[in-house]
Amino acid sequence: MSGNAATVLPLKQIDAFVTLQAHVLEEERHFPGATGTLSWIISALSISAKTIAAKLKRARLEDVLGEIGLENVQGEKQQKLDVIANNVLSQVLQGRQGVGVIGSEEDDELLVIDASDAGGTRYAVYFDPLDGSSNLDVGGSVGTIFSIFRCEPGSEQQLGRGRLQVAAGYVLYGSSTIFVLTTGFGVHMFVLDPAVGAFIRVARNLRIPLAGKSYSVNEANIEGFPPGIQRYLAECRQRGYSSRYAGAMVADVHRVLLKGGIFLYPPTTRSPAGKLRLMYEANPMAMILEQAGGMATTGQQPILDVEPDSLHQRVPVILGSPADVQRLMDISAGV
Ligand code: AHM
Ligand code: MG
């Protein structure tokens, strides 16, 4: 594992311009007897990401910024683009064979698409179509986060622990469009080449640095954080850490993945479960972080071991470089 930065391939090593599509087909060898259904679903996420990226670029020109005047089930004001991105993902996924159920941050309930037991593996796909959407009006980074589970006929409504995810990833819409994916065999990164319209692999088997020098948290809430977290942040300041917070989980976690450090959305006195949602924010990010050699915890248990009780359940999130997360845990435990 490298000391200071994750392994990103220099341009000359961008191996034979492997596309996301080719990478996923290549990875099928890890799944003897694979039918290609999961690859087909990842390809649906890829075309959705390209479509959303294109819509984001023209958002100001097409006058689709701002609120739509409605709230989602969680009482959050929906942006026009939240709804547009949700429609793109829902429609593309509903058209793909093998998608049994979808669950979105923007929809009240799970949507069962195919409950047949006619054979063939089916999957549940949970997603946050446009995370960090309060950044939209100011041209800041936003993202899409997704999590995929296998689902059995008759148990489409049953939510599983994050440990059972078969794939997870996110798309960062920033200065470039970046797709980060794991299917349980390392974390791989792709960048959209707008000239050819394909995601090109730029890094294989990303490893998070063992420790970083920055923390990412909404520090305005600090007085409501548990005392252990307050003590940890005070120690970080003493040790010369920087603070980096985009206010969009995808952008903040991507920085932590590449540069090391820690991202937190802890419990506060006002929101004891924090803000972030287990099924489509915390779980997929936790799988990516663990696959990259990092840690992801609620402060009480690994995020991936949390038994879910509802689609929109919230959990505290603490994730990042192993040394940083462990130090926070030790300080919280009074070590
Ligand atoms: P959203 O899914 O409604 O956009 O909210 C989630 C976002 C995360 O991207 C980010 O980490 C967090 O909310 C920021 O919240 P806050 O403004 O409280 O710091
Ligand atoms: Mg979100």
Image (cartoon, rainbow, N blue to C red):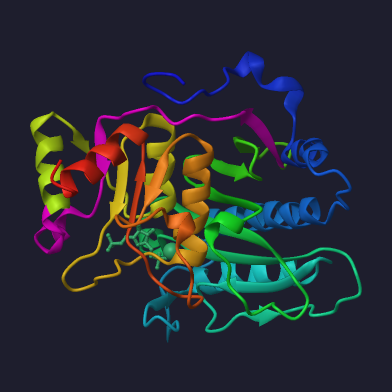
- Say if 210 sits above or below 273 in the image: above
Q: Is the C terminus in the top left, top right, bottom left or bottom right quadrant?
A: top left
Relative to 312, residue 182 above or below: above
Instruction: Describe residue 289's horizontal placement relative to residue 221 as left or right.
Output: right
Q: Is residue 239 left or right of residue 23?
A: left
Q: Classify 224 as above or below 28.
A: below
Q: On the image, which quarter does residue 68 sit in? A: bottom left
Q: Residue at x 47, y 34 (%)?
A: 293
Of residues 33 and 173, which is closer to you in this image?
A: 33
Name the one closer to the observer, 262 or 324.
Answer: 324
Query: In front here: 217 or 58?
Result: 217
Answer whether residue 164 is magenta in the image: no
The image quarter containing residue 185 is top right
- Left or right of 91 on screen, residue 165: left
The total of numbered circles placed on residues is: 0
Image point (58%, 53%), residue name: 53
Q: Quadrant location of ligand 1?
A: bottom left
Residue 37, how many percent across, how many down? 82, 57
Image position of 329 (left or right of 168): left
Residue 82: x, y in percent? 50, 70
In x, y percent, where is residue 165? 61, 56
Visible in this render: residue 58? Answer: no
Range of magenta residues: 198-227
Q: Position of residue 270 (x, y in %)?
A: 18, 74
Please say whether residue 225 is one of the residues in the magenta stretch: yes
In this orientation, does residue 178 appear?
yes
Residue at horizontal 59 percent and vertical 52 percent from the top = 168
